[in-house]
Amino acid sequence: MNAFWTQPDFDDHEVVHFVHDDKSGLTAIIALHSTHLGPAAGGTRFWHYAEPGAAMRDALRLSRGMSYKNAMAGLPMGGGKAVILAGEDRRKTPEMLAAFGKAVDGLGGKYVTAEDVGITVADMVAVHQQTEFVSGLPVEEGEAGGNPGPFTALGIYLGIKAAVKHKLGRDTVEGVHVAMQGVGSVGGGVARLLAKDGAKLTLADIAADEVQALGQELGADVVAPDAIMSVACDVFSPNALGATLDEAGIARLDCSIVAGGANNQLARPENGAMLAERGILYAPDYVINAGGIISVTMEYLCRRDDAPCDINEVRKRIALIPERLSKIWQDSEATGSSPDRVADAMAQKLIGRG
Ligand code: NAD
């Protein structure tokens, strides 16, 4: 294998830390892509990878995504991400979380962590026992922060509405058909918000019982996970894991819009142009899914007396997501460059790499 730093995913990361703690069994990667705008902020993923190279690629791609996400959301934070390499038994122990907390603390505030897939609020509380550089902790009612999922869902819901207006010229999502891949913390929240507005939903998740229950609750159709990408619909909303938009996946799509919360939806950089060639409007993932990081960053800054703690401030900032998406789509139409490329160029400029 080529050296990591010569691979495209490395993309000039400032530093990548490898963490191994024999006693607890912790193996983790903490990737800091950019601290140009502030401390690198981004969650921790706990995941079992088929091989360490896959964990590395995930950490690097997610970390760069956080640089772009935080910059585009107007946050005074850089971008980073941690992945904890789960064993085959996916066992997560208090000792591992403590060792991870110590590793984060050792970076002296250059990296601020939070929840991502596989990490709960309770896990973050455990990490917080070792370090102050943590967000996504429990907060009082009406305060910024806590579980980022509902805030991410709110931003995606607003982004889907903006895409429907832009592409279909419709002011509401009533009767708009949205096919949702993954209905966990984020996807489930988006589905509930869309259902309230009378959207027609088709849901899929590998958690069969949970998706059936949600389908019943919302009066939505449920299909098998391998069928969701070919459902004829207005909006395909990916809210599971990334890289589902590869050549084969895009060829299967039967929709006008792709807008969802999963990080790194495009498997390869050229997949954004493929969507555009098919006439599908794409909402760049790190722009539409910034609601959670906006909330936990406000929580972190509030704890350090650098920002208001009020949840309404979070909502105000999330309400700006549709405007940002519209600007990207307008620039894309004006330049012929696909929305992901337009967004990347905007973000790179903001982090001093344009
Ligand atoms: P989650 O674990 O709560 O939900 C993910 C869901 O996807 C689960 O229900 C899982 O069963 C399902 N799933 C996994 N593989 C699937 C497949 N092949 N087909 C259908 N369903 C599948 O995670 P989450 O917090 O909801 O995050 C979802 C995505 O959004 C992730 O990519 C995450 O990185 C991204 N994201 C999350 C947040 C947040 O605030 N939680 C913020 C930004 C981005």
Image: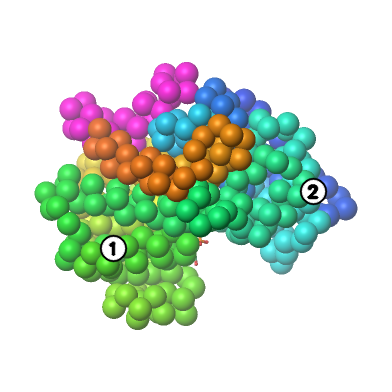
Residue 330 located within the stretch drawn in magenta: yes
Q: Quadrant of residue 176?
A: bottom left
Measured from the top left, where is residue 293 in percent x and y?
49, 44
Identified at 77% across, 35% down, the residue is 106
In-front residue for pair 98/92: 98
Residue pointed to by mark 2: 99
Q: Residue farthest to the left? A: 169
Left or right for 263, reference 111: left
Q: Which mark is residue 51?
A: none
Task: Name the image quarter holding the C terminus.
Answer: top left
The amino acid sitting under disc 2 is Ala
Mark 2 falls on what kind of element?
helix
- Asked if the beta carbon under badge 2 is closer than 8 A to the nearest atom of ligand 1, the reply is no
In this picture, residue 186 sits left or right of residue 215: right
Q: Which residues are magenta?
A: 328-354
Residue at the image point whose x is 20% and y is 33% from the top: 330
Q: Residue 72, relative to residue 230: is it above or below?
A: above
Which one is in front in this view, the residue at disc 2 or the one at disc 1? 1
Task: Please report the residue visible at 40 percent of the width from the left and 55 percent of the height from the top.
Answer: 153
Residue named by callout 1: 194
- Which amino acid lies under the numbered mark 1 shown in the image of this protein? Leu
**Which of the pair 167/111 is nearer the observer?**
111
